[in-house]
Image (cartoon, rainbow, N blue to C red):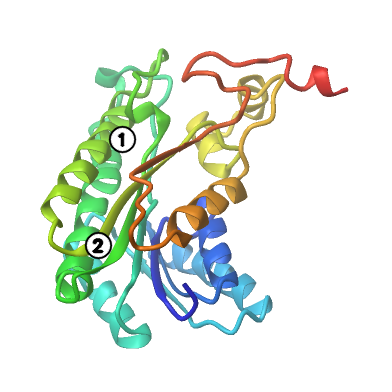
Amino acid sequence: MSHSNHLQTGASMGIGEAMALKLAEQGVNVALVSRSKILTLRQDKLEAVRSKIEEKRFGVKVRVYAVDLQNFTDVDRAVDQAVSELGQIDILVNNAGLALGAPGRFWELSVDQIQQMSGTNINGTMFATHSILNKTMWPRRKGTIVNVSSVTGLECPPFNGEAVYHASKAFLEGFTNSLRMETAGSDIKILVLRPGCVLTQFHLQRVKYDQDAMDEFFQGYEPLLAEDLADSLLYMLSLPPRISIKALDCVPTAQRSLTRFDREWNSRRE
C-alpha cells in the first residue's frame, strides 16, 4: 500500500481525518477533500489535518482541496489537481455526509436541509466517483473505491429526523452494488463500510450540539471511536487483490442491532 495515492472526502474531522492519518502512517499520499459552503472555514480545518499528518513525519505528500461537493465542476477540478500533484489515484473513500434536522419529521425539514443532505450524501459521492473513475481508475482498470454508508442504510431508524439521511445511505448500498457490477472486467474493487454508533463531532451535530442528548444516547456502553473505522478501512485495503470485503459492518459490541443496546456493558467492567 505504501506509495499509493488516496483521495478522501469528508476529511476535515472525525472518521475522515482518522482514515487519512491511518493511511498516511502506512506511507500513502493523501488528498484531503471536504465540502462546505464557507470554503475558507473548511480550508482551515483541512490545513489543520494536513499539519497533523506532516508533524508525524510519515514522509508522505499531503494536499488539501476545499470544494463544494454538490458542484461537479468543483469536484472534477479538485480531482484534476490531485492527479497532477500526486499522480494516479489508487484509493477513493467517499466519507462526506450530513445529517440535519432531527428530530423534525421529513415534511418539517427545510428544503435547504433536504438539498444539503441529498446534495452531499448522494450527489457528492456520485460526482467524486464519476470523476475518479474517468480520470484515473477506469483507464488503468485498477483502484479501490470505498463508500462509507451506515447500519441505518439497511434498517429503518425508529426515530424522527432520519428520512433523508437514511434514504441517502440506502442509496449508497444500491449505488455500490451496481457499480461493482459495472466495473466487472477490471481489477477495481468497490466496497462499502457501515459504521454503527460513533463518538464524533458528526453525531454531536446530529443532536444539535446537545451534550445531554449525546450522553443519553451513549449511556451505559462504549461507542466506536473514529480510529476504529480507520482500522476497519485499513483491513479492507490491506487484503490481496483476489479478496474483496464487499461490505463490512463495524459497530460497538453493545449495539446488538440498530435499535437494541446493551446498556449494562460498562457496569459489567467496573
- Give coordinates of residue 30: x percent, y percent: 45, 73
The residue shown at (39%, 18%) is 157
SS state under label 2: strand
Find disc 2 in the rendering and name its residue. Answer: 188
Find disc 1 in the rendering and name its residue. Answer: 169
Amino acid type, label 1: Lys
The residue shown at (60%, 73%) is 53
Tell which residue pokes out farthest to the front in this image: 242
10 Å crowding of disc 1: few (<14), some (14-19), many (20+): many
Quarter holding the C terminus? top right
- Give coordinates of residue 14: x percent, y percent: 55, 50
Amino acid type, label 2: Ile
In 3D space, how far apart are the residues under numbered discs 2 and 1 (Cα atoms)? 22 Å
Kindly indicate the quadrant of the structure image that contains residue 9.
bottom left
Q: Could you say which disc has been placed on residue 12 in the image?
A: none
- Give coordinates of residue 96: x percent, y percent: 38, 51
Location of residue 86 with respect to 99 vertically, above or below: below
Marks 2 and 1, the one that precedes in the sequence: 1
Q: From where the camera sits, is residue 14 visible?
A: no
Kindly indicate the quadrant of the structure image that contains residue 42.
bottom left
Q: From where the camera sits, is residue 26 visible?
A: yes
- Give coordinates of residue 65: x percent, y percent: 38, 71
Location of residue 136 with respect to 209 vertically, above or below: below
Q: Nearer the viewer, residue 227 or 143?
A: 143
Asked if residue 62 lies left or right of residue 140, the reply is: right
Q: Nearer the viewer, residue 223 or 81?
A: 223
Asked if residue 195 lies left or right of residue 168, the reply is: right
SS state under label 1: helix
| Number of numbered tags placed on the structure image | 2
10 Å crowding of disc 2: few (<14), some (14-19), many (20+): many
Q: Nearer the viewer, residue 88 or 36?
A: 88
